[in-house]
Image (cartoon, coloured by chain):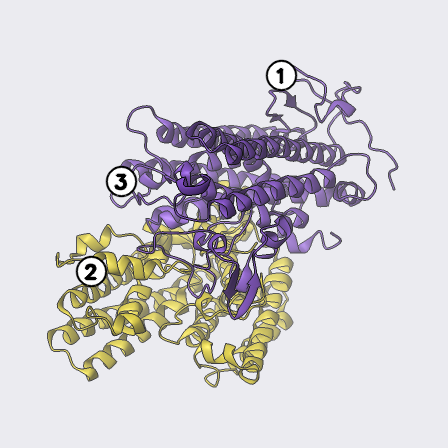
C-alpha cells in the first residue's frame, strides 16, 4: 500500500497565474516531464476531481451567502444577486459530472444535488393548469412549503420543521424519482419559479415578494419558503464538503486512496467510461436528443432559469478536461498534469490528435449553442431551439449531438488502444 | 440516480462506420458475408411483417372511422396489437435505415414518464383544426407512433372524455398517425432491402448486429422488466415504467421481442458460433431461449396485475431470472468469446 501520494510530473504547458491555495500545489515541486503512466494519469484525474469539487464548494458557499442576504433583505437586487450566484455555482459543478459515471461513489451521491427533472409541486405552489408531473407520482402536488404534514403514497410525514436532514430524506419520497426536494434544481426553482413560457422566450418569474415579510408576502408561506431555501443551500455545502474529502490527497481512508490502490487500468477505464457515458447516453441522448425529437421542454435540464445551454457547455468542458488533464479553476488558475492524451499519444499520436480536434469541435458546437442562447438580440434559449418547426434551433442542437457522437467513437478507440477490453462498468470496479 | 433511458440509435452509427474500425481484419470480412446475408434476409422478413401489419392497421383505422361500431373498434385494437408486436420483433435492430430520421423513436417513443403522449394529444385536439399528414410529420416523435394510437384506443380517462373515439377530430388523428406508421413501415422495409450490399460488404456490421442484440437484451432485462418490477433505483414497483401499460400488453411485447431475437438474430448467430467451434455455447443459448419462451403464453397478463400481488409477482420473477441468464450467455459469454466489445450505448448515463 502506498503510504504517500507520489509527486506527479506537472507540465506547465500554458503560462498561468499559479496562486497559493491551488489544489495541485502539492505536486508542483516536480517539474520533470517524465512520460505519463497509467498510475500518474489516474492520480492527476483525482486531482482534477478534487479541484472541481473544491470549486463547486467555494461557489456553493457564495450562493449560500447570497441567499442568506436575500432572505434577510428581500429586494430585487438581492434576488438577482442570488440568481447570479446560482449560475456561477453551476459552472464548476457541471464540469464535475464527468466523474459521475464509472465512479459509483459519485453517482450514488449526486441525486441529492443534481437530480432532474423534478415535480416542483412537491416543494411549493405551482400553476395547476398545465403542470405535468410524472405518471403515478403521489407526491407531485404535496407542496411541502404550504404544509405542516404531507401525505405521499399513504405515508404521512411531519414537515413542520424544515431541516436539511428532513428534506434530504424526502428525495424520491413515495418511490418516485421526480420527487426531488434538494439540490441545485430545487434551489433553482426557489429562485426562479416555474417557467410558464413553454416554447416562448422567457424563464421563471418568481417575485422576490415570495420571500417578503408580513403583509407583503405573495403566494403565502413566505417564512417557510425562506426556511426551505436556507436549509437546501446549507445542505448543498455539507454534501460538497463530503465529496471534496473523498478526493483529497494524503488521506488513507477515502475514495481517492481506494482508487490509487486499485489497478491503474481500473482508474483509466473509469475515466474513459465517464467521458463516453456523459458524451453519448447522457448529454447527446437524454439531455439533448430526447428534448429535441419529442419537442419536450419538460426534458430541459435547467428549465426554471433557462440556463440549459451553460449546463451542456460545461458538461462538454468537463469531458475535455479529463482527456487533456487541464482544468481552469474558478479563480483563473490552471490545473494541469499527466493526461489520457499523453498516454494515447505515446502509441497512437494520430488518434490522440483526432480526439483532441473532436473535443474542440464539440466545444465549438456547444459554444454556438451558448452564444445563440445568450445573444443580445433575439436570443434563442434551449427551450426555444427545441420548439416544433424551429429548423435553425434544431440544426444548432443537432450540431452538438453529432459532435458528441463522433468524439465517443474515438473515446472507444482510445480505450482499445490502452488495452481496455470492455468499457462496461460492471466488468471492472467490483471492488469499489 | 437512475432515470429514464431511451433506445438511442447513436452508437451503431459509429460502430458501423466502415472507416472507423481499422481493427476489423480483411480475412474476417470475407468469411463473414454469409452471416450477414442471412441476417439481412431474416431481418428483412421481420421488417416486411411490420410493413404489412402497419398497413393493415391504417386500413382498419380508416374503416372504423368511416363506420364506427364497438366491433370495428375492437378490430382496430387488434390491428394495433398485431402491428405493435411486429415492431417488438424487430425493435432490437438499432443500426442501418431505422436510424434515419429517428424512425425507431417514431415507432415507439418510450419511456414517457411525463406523459407527453397525453399532452401532445390534448394539444392537437384542442380545437377543430384538421389533423393533416404534414401536421403529424412536424409534431415530434411522441405523436408519431404506436403509443399515440394506443393512447387513443385504450386510455381510460381519455375514453371517457368528450373527445373519445369515434369523435371526428380524434378519428382524424387516429387515421393520420396510423397512416404515418404504415408509411414508415413500408419505407423501412424498402430501405432495408436497398441496404443489402452495403450491409453484406461491410464487415463491421457483424459487430453492429451482435451489439444490437446485446443492447436489445440489456434493455429488455433492465428497462422493460427490472425497472417496473422495482429491482432498480428506489425499489418501487411501477406499471408506468413498463411499455404498453395502457393496453396491458407489456408482457406480450416482451414475448414478441424474444421471439424476434430468436427468429431474426439467432439463426446466423448460431451458425457463426458453430463455425468458431462454439457449438456448445450456441446450444446453450438456444436452450435458454426455450426457457424464456416457456413462460409464455401463460405470462401474457397485464403488468399491473403481476406487480400487484406477490404470488403473481413470483411468476414475473421467474421470467426475469430466465432473461437474466439469457443476457449473461449472449452478452457476457458469447460476445466476449467472439471479441465483441460492448462499447458505449445510449443506455449509459443515468
Name the image quarter holding the N terminus of chain B: bottom right
Who is closer to the viewer here, A416 or A174? A174
Check disc 3 and report the residue beneath it.
Answer: A390
Frontmost of labels 2 and 3 is 2
| Residue A54 falls left or right of residue A307 | right
Vertical arrangement, residue A221 with respect to residue B186, above or below: above
What residue is drawn where x is 32% and y is 57%? B142
Tag 2 secondary structure: loop
- Asked whether the viewer can see residue A219, the reply is yes
Check disc 1 and report the residue beneath it.
Answer: A14
The residue carrying pointer 1 sits among few (fewer than 14), some (14 to 19) or many (20 or more) residues within 10 Å by Cα, namely: few
What residue is drawn where x is 32% and y is 48%? A295
Who is closer to the viewer here, A199 or B250? A199
- Residue B125's label in the rendered image is 2
What residue is drawn where x is 67% and y is 24%? A336
Query: Given the image, what chain letter belongs to the residue carrying mark 1?
Result: A
Amino acid at each position: 500500500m502506498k503510504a504517500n501520494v507520489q509527486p506527479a510530473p506537472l507540465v506547465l504547458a500554458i503560462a498561468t497565474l499559479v496562486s497559493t491555495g491551488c489544489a495541485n500545489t502539492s505536486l508542483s515541486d516536480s517539474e520533470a516531464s517524465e512520460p505519463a503512466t497509467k498510475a500518474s494519469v489516474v492520480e492527476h484525474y483525482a486531482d482534477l476531481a478534487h479541484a472541481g469539487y473544491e470549486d463547486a464548494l467555494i461557489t456553493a458557499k457564495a450562493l449560500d451567502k447570497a441567499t442568506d442576504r436575500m432572505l434577510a433583505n428581500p429586494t430585487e437586487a438581492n434576488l438577482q444577486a442570488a440568481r447570479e450566484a446560482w449560475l456561477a455555482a453551476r459552472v464548476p459543478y457541471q464540469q464535475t459530472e464527468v466523474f459521475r459515471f464509472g465512479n459509483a461513489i459519485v453517482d450514488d451521491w449526486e441525486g441529492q444535488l443534481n437530480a432532474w427533472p423534478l415535480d416542483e409541486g412537491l416543494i411549493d405552489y405551482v400553476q395547476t393548469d398545465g403542470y405535468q408531473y410524472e405518471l403515478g407520482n403521489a407526491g407531485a402536488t404535496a407542496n411541502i412549503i404550504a404544509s405542516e404534514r404531507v401525505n405521499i403514497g399513504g405515508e404521512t410525514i411531519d414537515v413542520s420543521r424544515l431541516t436539511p436532514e428532513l428534506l434530504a430524506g424526502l428525495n424520491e419520497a413515495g418511490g418516485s424519482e421526480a420527487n426531488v426536494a434538494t439540490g441545485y434544481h430545487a434551489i433553482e426553482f426557489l429562485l426562479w419559479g416555474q417557467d410558464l413560457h413553454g416554447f416562448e422566450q422567457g424563464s421563471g418569474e418568481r417575485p422576490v415578494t415570495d420571500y417578503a415579510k408580513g403583509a407583503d408576502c405573495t403566494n403565502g408561506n413566505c417564512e417557510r419558503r425562506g426556511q426551505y431555501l436556507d436549509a437546501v443551500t446549507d445542505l448543498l455545502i455539507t454534501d460538497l464538503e463530503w465529496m471534496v474529502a473523498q478526493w483529497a490527497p494524503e488521506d488513507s481512508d477515502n475514495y481517492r486512496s481506494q482508487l490509487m490502490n486499485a489497478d491503474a487500468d481500473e482508474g483509466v477505464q473509469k475515466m474513459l467510461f465517464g467521458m463516453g457515458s456523459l458524451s453519448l447516453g447522457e448529454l447527446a441522448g437524454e439531455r439533448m436528443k430526447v428534448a429535441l425529437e419529442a419537442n419536450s421542454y419538460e426534458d430541459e435540464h435547467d428549465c426554471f432559469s433557462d440556463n440549459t445551454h451553460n449546463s451542456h457547455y460545461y458538461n462538454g468542458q468537463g469531458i475535455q478536461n479529463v482527456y487533456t488533464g487541464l482544468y481552469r479553476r474558478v479563480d483563473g488558475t490552471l490545473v494541469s498534469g499527466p493526461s489520457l492524451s499523453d498516454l494515447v499519444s505515446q502509441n497512437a499520436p494520430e488518434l490522440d490528435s483526432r480526439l483532441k480536434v473532436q473535443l474542440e469541435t464539440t466545444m465549438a458546437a456547444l459554444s454556438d449553442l451558448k452564444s445563440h442562447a445568450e445573444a443580445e438580440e433575439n436570443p434563442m434559449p434551449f427551450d426555444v431551439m427545441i420548439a416544433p418547426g424551429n429548423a435553425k434551433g434544431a440544426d444548432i442542437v443537432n450540431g452538438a449531438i453529432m459532435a458528441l457522437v463522433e468524439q465517443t467513437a474515438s473515446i472507444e478507440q482510445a480505450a482499445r488502444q490502452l488495452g481496455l477490453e470492455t468499457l462496461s462498468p460492471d466488468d471492472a470496479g467490483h471492488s469499489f | 440516480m437512475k432515470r429514464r433511458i431511451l433506445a438511442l440509435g447513436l452508437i451503431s452509427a459509429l460502430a458501423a462506420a466502415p472507416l472507423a474500425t481499422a481493427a476489423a481484419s480483411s480475412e474476417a470480412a470475407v468469411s463473414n458475408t454469409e452471416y450477414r446475408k442471412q441476417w439481412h434476409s431474416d431481418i428483412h422478413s421481420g421488417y416486411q411483417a411490420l410493413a404489412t401489419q402497419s398497413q393493415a392497421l391504417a386500413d382498419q383505422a380508416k374503416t372504423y372511422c368511416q363506420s364506427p361500431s364497438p366491433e370495428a373498434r375492437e378490430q382496430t385494437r387488434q390491428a394495433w396489437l398485431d402491428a405493435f408486436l411486429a415492431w417488438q420483433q424487430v425493435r432490437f435492430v438499432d443500426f442501418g435505415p431505422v436510424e434515419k430520421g429517428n424512425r425507431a423513436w417514431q415507432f415507439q417513443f418510450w419511456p414517457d414518464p411525463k406523459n407527453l403522449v397525453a399532452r401532445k394529444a390534448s394539444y392537437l385536439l384542442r380545437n377543430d383544426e384538421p389533423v393533416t399528414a404534414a401536421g403529424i410529420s412536424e409534431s415530434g416523435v411522441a405523436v408519431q407512433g404506436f403509443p399515440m394510437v394506443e393512447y387513443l384506443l385504450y386510455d381510460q380517462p381519455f375514453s371517457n372524455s368528450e373527445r373519445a373515439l369515434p369523435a371526428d377530430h380524434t378519428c382524424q388523428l387516429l387515421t393520420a398517425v396510423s397512416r404515418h406508421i404504415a408509411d414508415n413501415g413500408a419505407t423501412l422495409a424498402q430501405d432495408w432491402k436497398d441496404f443489402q450490399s452495403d450491409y453484406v460488404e461491410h464487415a463491421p456490421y457483424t459487430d453492429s448486429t451482435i451489439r444490437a442484440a446485446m443492447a436489445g437484451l440489456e434493455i429488455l432485462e433492465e428497462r422493460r422488466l427490472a425497472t417496473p418490477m422495482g429491482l432498480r433505483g428506489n425499489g418501487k414497483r411501477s406499471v408506468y415504467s413498463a411499455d404498453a401499460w395502457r393496453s396491458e400488453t407489456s408482457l406480450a411485447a416482451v414475448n414478441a421481442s424474444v421471439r424476434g431475437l430468436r427468429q431474426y438474430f439467432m439463426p446466423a448467430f448460431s451458425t457463426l458460433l458453430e463455425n468458431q467451434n462454439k457449438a456448445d455455447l450456441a446450444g446453450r443459448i438456444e436452450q435458454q431461449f426455450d426457457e424464456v419462451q416457456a413462460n409464455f403464453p401463460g405470462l401474457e397478463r397485464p403488468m399491473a396485475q403481476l406487480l400487484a400481488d406477490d404470488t403473481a409477482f413470483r411468476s414475473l420473477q421467474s421470467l426475469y431470472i430466465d432473461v437474466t441468464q439469457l443476457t449473461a450467455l449472449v452478452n457476457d459469454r458469447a460476445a466476449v468469446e467472439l471479441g465483441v466489445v460492448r462499447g458505449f450505448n445510449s443506455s449509459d448515463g443515468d
